[in-house]
Image (tube, rainbow, N blue to C red):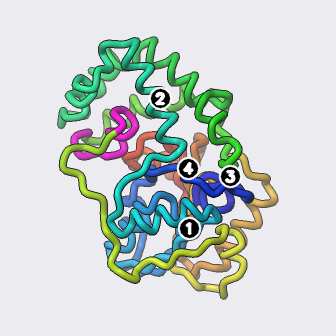
Amino acid sequence: MRRGISGRTSATPRHRLLYGWDIEDEQIELSLLAPGSRVLSAAGAGELVAHLAAAGHEVVAVSANREQLEYARRRSAGGAFEPGSAERVLEAGRALIRAASPAWHRRKVRSLLSDASPQRVQQQWRQRFDNRTFRSVLHATMAPAGMLAAAIQRDFSTALPAHFTDTVRARIDARLGIHPSPGNRFAWRLLAGEDPPGYAPPIAPPGSIAFAEEDALTHLESVAPASYDAVTLSNVADGTRADVVERLGRAARRAVVPGGPIVVRSFAASADARASALADEDRSLIWGGIHVQR
């Protein structure tokens, strides 16, 4: 679940499209799941759940936001990408950067991301792209009081950590030096606002995903014990009250078979070395920690 307890959105969501792209790297979940697992996930933008279903898992996707849920249903079945609130705000930020910084011309960003050497990409990023214009617009867009927060704070319960823009810059810098960029859709989407050439989103097999219009907490508390082999949640503790986080943790542990993984992503930095290492492995570049509880 991302952005709050209801599967990314607030507990009283506005029924509109909030995001058209997922930012969870399915490779994390796929490395943890046993074959043919039954998995609970936020519906999100339909991409993570489609990847899991295409890999042979049985998925239940939840969201209390009806429009987001229906988009996820369409997208997971092969529907076209539609920008949500998050993508529109980020594209506005990229447009400002391009207008003020020649280094950020679309052709130059594409050239950067087409380089197969992470070391060269990181070097070019530091020398040309991580400039004053980028830093200024990043702050205006992604700071806790910036454009992104102002545009979607009514719909997202996630609170961005303090100094988040500096943290994001550091994570982008470090992880561009880890993951090859040419096929990394997360890097292309974040920096260029488009998918890499040749990318085709997954299509879930018919009937492999059950979509439920309810929040994750309500769902987890309503199912029988050991109903799932795994649960994947995101931002569950980012801006959520401690008692709600504790309640959700209990519900997840009850709903998962003994020893089954509960994957919890957070924007916040983690002191847990394994959670930080998994965040580095996630190609989306921006997670602070990915905790796996069993």
- C-beta proximity under 8 Å, tags 4 and 2: no
- Residue at horizontal 79%, vertical 52%? 241
**SS under mark 1:** strand
Kindly identify the residue that appears in the image at 22 percent across and 25 percent down: 107
Decide: few, some or many residues near mark 3? Use Cα within 10 Å; few <14, some 14-19, many ≥20: many
Please name the residue that numbered disc 4 is placed on: 18
Q: Position of residue 161 (x, y in %)?
A: 65, 36
Front: mark 3 or 1: 3
Q: Nearer the viewer, mark 4 or mark 3?
A: 4
Q: Which residue is mark 2?
A: 92
The picture quadrant where one finds residue 5 is: bottom right
What span is colored magenta in the figure? 181-193
> Residue beneath label 3, please?
237
Left or right: where 100 falls relative to 167: left
Circle number at residue 262? 1
Viewer-side label of 4, 1: 4
**What amino acid is at disc 4?**
Leu
Position of 95 with respect to 137 (left or right) is: left
Q: Quadrant of residue 154?
A: top right
Tell which circle, 4 or 1, labels the residue nearer the N-terminal end. Answer: 4
